[in-house]
Amino acid sequence: MSNVVVVGGCGFIGSHLSLMLCKDNDVTVFDKASLPAKLKGKVKFVKGDIRDLAILEDVLSLADTVYHLAAQISVPKSFVEPYYDFSVNALGSINVAEACVKNKVKNLVVFSSAAVFGDNPNVPLSEDAETKPLSPYGDNKLFAEKYIGYIKKDVTFVRPFNVYGKGQDPANSYSGVISKFIDMARNGQDLIIFGDGKQTRDFVNVGDLCRAVIKVTGISGTFNVGCGKSVSINELAETVNGLFGLKSKVVYVDAREGDILHSCADVSKLRSVGWGAEIALKDGLKEMI
């Protein structure tokens, strides 16, 4: 069994990945948040912040593989607190890479973001598509990719598109549109859409994402992770309403700064290594409901 450290393993994606990894590995979760109940007794836990290089170096001392998910995840917050975003997403990521190099960690898998592409109209987007981030968040994710590449060779970068799934907390202001729509519809509230709802997203289930990440571990390079299908926010609202058998009113408000119009992944590179999305959007929504 391998020694695996999941940096940022208490979050929505990190906890799903940690749970999947602990079936075949000794997993340590490193996070400044509290360990979720579903991981207690299954993983080792070390509390700490990625901005503390000394703690990171100690935690990664015996690691064979490191998954780096720790991040400031809100695009709006990155405008309000740009230095904090930079300190976590850029400088903190450099710490992770340096700690891996010092400890001769074999495999490093870094979670970047589709936000690095910005509003590139040439969808679906391949890994070598032009990057034009629209926010400090996207810029710092791209910065981290570049600088980690200088520090450590043979790194695996994954760029998730819009991730959803069980355990995504709608009360968290940074959660995705799917969990929020489900929560609003369940409570008979209006479905709030920022902009005209014609913007499109590529929604990938967290289970499919984690399987993709494990599949590409140890393969140097960058991988987009999505389903390769575009869904408009208007279509999503209609689907959620239909699954509840309700008709919540759709209310449109001003678009948010930094939000992109169209996003869809070209996942041919992932398919070439034997991965394919298994969970259709409607089935994933039913599971969450």
Image: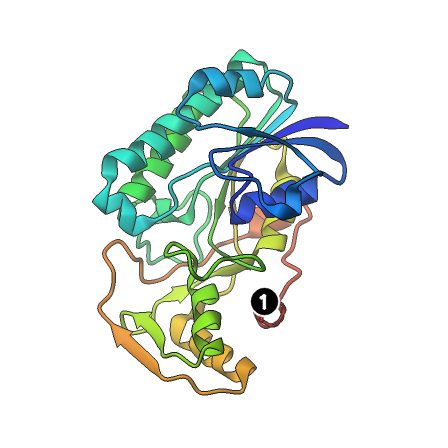
Q: Label 1 is placed on what type of residue?
A: Met
Farthest-out residue, top: 102
* Residue 264, image x, y percentages: 44, 59
At 25% from the left and 60% from the top, the residue drawn is 256
Q: Is residue 195 above or below residue 222?
A: below
Q: Is residue 214 above or below residue 1?
A: below
Q: Regarding mark 1 in the picture, which secondary structure is present there?
A: helix
On the rendered image, what quadrant is the N terminus found in?
A: top right
At 66% from the left and 50% from the top, the residue drawn is 275
Q: Is residue 57 above or below residue 90?
A: above
Which color scheme did the rendering employ for the protein?
A: rainbow
Q: Is residue 119 above or below residue 250?
A: above
* Residue 36, image x, y percentages: 58, 45
Residue matched to label 1: 288
Q: Is residue 41 left or right of residue 212?
A: right
Q: Is residue 110 visible?
A: yes
Q: Is residue 84 left or right of residue 157?
A: left
Image label count: 1
Judge by depth and name the residue closer to the eye, 190 or 78.
190
At 28% from the left and 51% from the top, the residue drawn is 76
Judge by depth and name the residue closer to the eye, 188 or 140.
188
Residue 206 found in image quarter:
bottom right
On the rendered image, what quadrant is the C terminus found in?
A: bottom right
